[in-house]
Image (cartoon, helix red, strand yellow):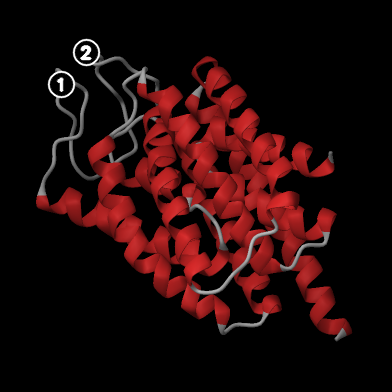
Amino acid sequence: MLSMLIGLAVGLVMGLTGGGGSVFAVPLLITLLRWPFNQAATVSLLAVGLAATVGTAISWRHSNVRYRAALLMAFVGLMFSYVGIHVANDLPESTLKFVFSLVLGIVSIRMYLMTVKARDSNDVVQEFTSGDSLPFLGRVGKLNPITGRLVWTHQVATIVSFIGAVTGFLSGLLGVGGGFLIVPAIRAILPLSMHTAVSTSLMTLALTSSGTFIFALIQGRSVPFSLASPFVIGTILGITIGRLLAPKISGPSLQKTFALLAFGVSIAMAAQTTLTMIRT
């Protein structure tokens, strides 16, 4: 029951923010269910991959998914995720936990500062339809004014590939889908709304997390499916609810809420890891 509730919370966060589910999944599974880091990370990838697939299907009908960007990020990400798994297998669990908390803390602070900057400059990002004009935070690329889709250039492709490489490596290293990095990176660099960034992130997560999970199995990790099933089912239910609620909540509100939650998790995990290292 507790495993399903954790999954429900994780899926809800994923549905509302386009990522962050595995960011909460890994520390919650470790703390509340006492799972080893690698086991929690591998199960998290399975749940996130399946839930993100459901979330992508729900988002698709709103035409918010930028599938070309998602496919490119996932393709590059999968190549680097294999490297990340190799590195993770050679590092102690305490080091992985500390790196996890550090990365999450940096990203959450960055995301919150972006929200404050947007508010102060009245640069409020709005959900849009294909014909709307769009104020945005992104500095690279532009949108087709008729379709609202991203205009591809060499610079845009390079940026998207780099985002995919970083998130893919972190997927393999820490067992995270990478959505907590994809969404703020897209919002900081590309001219896409919050809801479009969330939807595109979900498709990327569906491909990257599923592929990384398969790589993890190939490299010898095991998954206790009897224990993982309630968590996976809860995650899928949560993301379904989250995607239905997301269009009714403003982009900046989603961004700020996720940033605060992520920062709290990073502090708690860093403190717990530090205490454990001192005691040992």
Residue 122 visible in rendering:
no
Which mark is drawn over residue 40? none
The residue tagged 1 is: 145
Dot 2 amino acid type: Gly
Dot 1 amino acid type: Pro
The residue lying furthest to the left in this view is 153
Q: Residue at (60%, 82%) from the top-left corner?
A: 91
Q: Is residue 112 left or right of residue 164?
A: right
The answer to whether residue 78 is above or below residue 6 is below
Q: Is residue 9 left or right of residue 126?
A: right
Crowd band around label 1 with a 10 angstrom C-alpha radius: few (<14), some (14–19), many (20+): some
Q: Residue at (51%, 66%) from the top-left corner?
A: 216
Q: Residue at (67%, 49%) from the top-left corner?
A: 24
Q: CA distance from mark 2 to mark 1?
A: 7 Å
Q: Name the quarter where the C terminus is drawn.
A: bottom right
The residue lying furthest to the right in this view is 279
Q: Residue at (20%, 28%) from the top-left corner?
A: 149
Rendered location of residue 266, percent (x, y): 68, 58
Which mark is drawn over residue 131? 2
Crowd band around label 2 with a 10 angstrom C-alpha radius: few (<14), some (14–19), many (20+): few
> Looking at the rendering, which quadrant does residue 9 occupy?
top right
Question: Disc 2, disc 1: CB below 8 Å?
Answer: yes
> Looking at the rendering, which quadrant does residue 198 occupy?
top left
Q: Is residue 67 left or right of residue 250?
A: left
Callout count: 2
Q: Secondary structure at mark 1?
A: loop
